[in-house]
Image: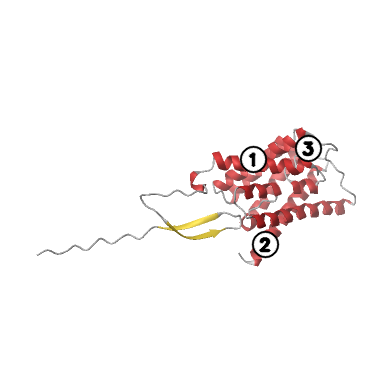
């Protein structure tokens, strides 16, 4: 992986998270800041950012998603840490940009005291979001199908969580929108780990499992491994050469 591609991945996560956070702040704090409008706006923005940046960084835009991918071993530890830093910086930039545009500080919208129902709502909402993302990952969706799946998953997740929380489902978005407390930090992380690992454990297609099976009828020999920007690994295999039949001995 070149230096240029590594920088591009971090910039993609920074920009994607920042744009997503800005869109959510603008709608959530406007006169139409109803849950359905916020969910729809977030879903559309997520879809567009996925189409733009998926081939560059995998389009996480969420520290919880990155941590979930890390638990699935789809991303290395150093890369995951770098992604999380870029995402949090993107959220911070969106927060400051919103204050610059409005000319006033964003009011904090998180509850003063910890509430378990808020925590549970964030867990469930992020569970729905990441369950859909993992389904798209293991079923190898691409292009519009991938964007539609992750966008719809975010929409449903926000609607589910809105029953009891501010529906952040993302620590970076929580920072940007000043909904920052333990529920909005740890709730999405727990939900992502549960959602992604449950899908991988029970519903992932067998061809996507990490442990490769050996076909005794036609064993294959791996010759190279390529790693994509999203952390997926593809093994290129070559069928063994056929043995030439032994020459028949001539009899007189």
Which-is-in-front pick, marks 3 and 1? Answer: 1
Q: In this figure, which residue is indicated by the disc labeled 3?
A: 34
User: In the figure, is residue 241 to the left or right of 161?
Assistant: left
Q: Within 10 Å of the Cα at label 2, are there few (<14), some (14-19), or many (20+) other Cα atoms? A: some
Q: Disc 3 to disc 1, how far (Cα)?
A: 28 Å
Q: Residue 53: x, y in percent?
A: 65, 56
Quarter assignment of residue 178: top right
Q: Is residue 225 visible?
A: yes
Q: In this figure, which residue is indicated by the disc labeled 2?
A: 8
Q: Residue at (75%, 39%) from the top-left corner?
A: 167
- Does the residue at mark 1 contact the one at mark 2 (Cβ under 8 Å)? no
For numbered disc 3, what is the local secondary structure?
A: loop
Q: Disc 1 to disc 2, how far (Cα)?
A: 29 Å
Q: Residue at (75%, 44%) from the top-left corner?
A: 185
Quarter assignment of residue 8: bottom right
Q: Which mark is on residue 133?
A: none
The image shows a total of numbered marks equal to 3
Q: Residue at (87%, 54%) from the top-left corner?
A: 100
Which quadrant: the C terminus?
Answer: bottom left
Q: In this figure, which residue is indicated by the disc labeled 1?
A: 194
């Amino acid at each position: 992986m070149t230096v240029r591609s590594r920088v591009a991945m971090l910039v993609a996560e920074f920009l994607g998270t920042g744009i997503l956070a800005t869109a959510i702040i603008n709608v959530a704090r406007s006169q139409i800041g109803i849950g359905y409008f916020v969910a729809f706006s977030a879903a559309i923005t997520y879809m567009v950012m996925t189409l733009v940046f998926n081939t560059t960084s995998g389009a996480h835009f969420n520290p919880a998603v990155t941590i979930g991918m890390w638990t699935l071993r789809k991303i290395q530890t150093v890369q995951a840490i770098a992604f999380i830093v870029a995402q949090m910086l993107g959220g911070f930039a969106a927060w400051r940009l919103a204050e610059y545009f409005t000319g006033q500080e964003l009011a904090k919208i998180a509850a003063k005291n910890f509430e378990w129902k808020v925590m549970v709502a964030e867990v469930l909402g992020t569970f729905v979001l990441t369950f859909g993302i993992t389904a798209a990952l293991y079923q190898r969706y691409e292009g519009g199908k991938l964007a539609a799946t992750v966008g719809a998953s975010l929409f449903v997740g926000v609607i589910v969580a809105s029953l009891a929380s501010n529906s952040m489902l993302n620590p970076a978005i929580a920072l940007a929108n000043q909904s920052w407390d333990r529920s909005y930090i740890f709730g999405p992380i727990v939900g992502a780990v549960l959602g992604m690992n449950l899908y991988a454990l029970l519903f992932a297609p067998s061809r996507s499992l990490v442990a490769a099976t050996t076909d005794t009828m036609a064993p294959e020999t791996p010759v190279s491994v390529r790693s994509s920007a999203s952390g997926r690994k593809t093994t290129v295999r070559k069928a063994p050469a056929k043995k030439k039949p032994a020459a028949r001995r001539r009899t007189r």
